[in-house]
Image (tube, rainbow, N blue to C red):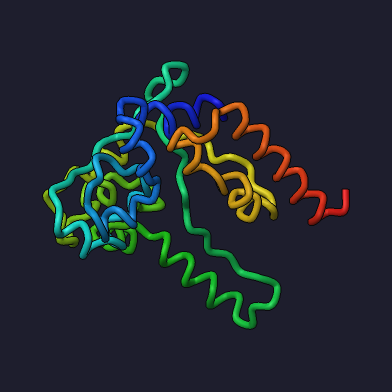
């Protein structure tokens, strides 16, 4: 965590003069839709689909994320959407047919053209990523430049506890708190949150 926070939220801002560092923000969407004074945004590959209006106003392109020297050629983990059938489903067979269709190469090619990373390994689906979007000339293939990192294990508290951890991350970016203090406070808040949720 120390390495990730240092690389992502401290190092990029070190060259800013103190006044500008105090104005630094970490919200890509806010900068895209508002001031448009954004040098780089690390975000989901679906941004060109969800931020069409904002991205149409600026000059931009896509590149692969930086990697760690310990893991050359390994990029970010995937952030997939999952489809499943619950025990409450009344038409399980029909639902399964829909899921089967969504995983066909034919459907995945069309989804890919519309800017959604395909959930299959089909080269036909991969190579048409983003071709039906207003940004078909952009380097969508950058998302495949590195091998995807394994998806981290998740539990029922992850989404909520993430908000606890990142509560003061802007203070870290702006240099109002040092990294060790930030990590210590985040751990204390996280442990308190888990205690409240689990009674342990």
Does residue 34 lie above or below 9 as drawn?
below
Q: Is residue 128 left or right of residue 22?
A: left
The x, y position of residue 33, in whole percent, is 26, 60
Q: Is residue 148 visible?
A: no
The x, y position of residue 120, in whole percent, is 39, 50
Residue pictured at 24% horizontal, 55% vertical: 35
Q: Nearer the viewer, residue 183 or 89?
A: 183
The x, y position of residue 60, in whole percent, is 17, 46
Q: Nearer the viewer, residue 156 or 5?
A: 5
Residue pictured at 61% horizontal, 69% vertical: 85
Q: Is residue 25 left or right of residue 40?
A: right
Does residue 180 lie above or below 34 as drawn?
above
Q: Residue furthest right?
A: 200
In the rendered image, which quarter contains the N terminus?
top right
Residue pictured at 61% horizontal, 75% vertical: 92
The x, y position of residue 129, in whole percent, is 24, 52
- Quadrant in the rendering for residue 93: bottom right
Q: Is residue 10 left or right of residue 177?
A: left
Does residue 35 lie above or below 139 as drawn?
below
- Quadrant in the rendering for residue 84: bottom right
Total marks shown come to: 0
Q: Is residue 103 left or right of residue 177?
A: left
Q: Residue furthest front?
A: 19
Q: Is residue 81 visible?
A: yes
């Amino acid at each position: 965590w120390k390495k990730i926070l240092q690389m992502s939220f401290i190092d990029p801002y070190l060259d800013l003069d103190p006044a500008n560092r105090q104005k630094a923000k970490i919200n890509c969407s806010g900068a895209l839709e508002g001031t448009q004074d954004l040098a780089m945004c690390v975000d989901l590959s679906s941004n060109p689909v969800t931020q069409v209006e904002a991205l149409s106003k600026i000059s931009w392109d896509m590149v692969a994320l930086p990697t760690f020297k310990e893991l050359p050629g390994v990029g970010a983990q995937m952030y997939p959407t999952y489809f499943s059938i619950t025990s409450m489903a009344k038409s399980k067979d029909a639902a399964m047919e829909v899921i089967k269709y969504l995983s066909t190469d034919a459907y995945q090619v069309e989804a890919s053209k519309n800017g959604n990373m395909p959930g299959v390994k089909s080269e036909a689906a991969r190579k048409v990523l983003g071709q039906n979007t207003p940004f078909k000339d952009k380097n969508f293939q950058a998302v495949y430049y590195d091998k995807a990192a394994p998806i981290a294990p998740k539990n029922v508290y992850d989404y909520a506890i993430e908000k606890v951890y990142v509560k003061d991350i802007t203070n870290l970016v702006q240099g109002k708190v040092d990294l060790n203090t930030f990590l210590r406070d985040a751990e204390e808040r996280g442990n308190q949150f888990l205690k409240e949720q689990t009674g342990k």
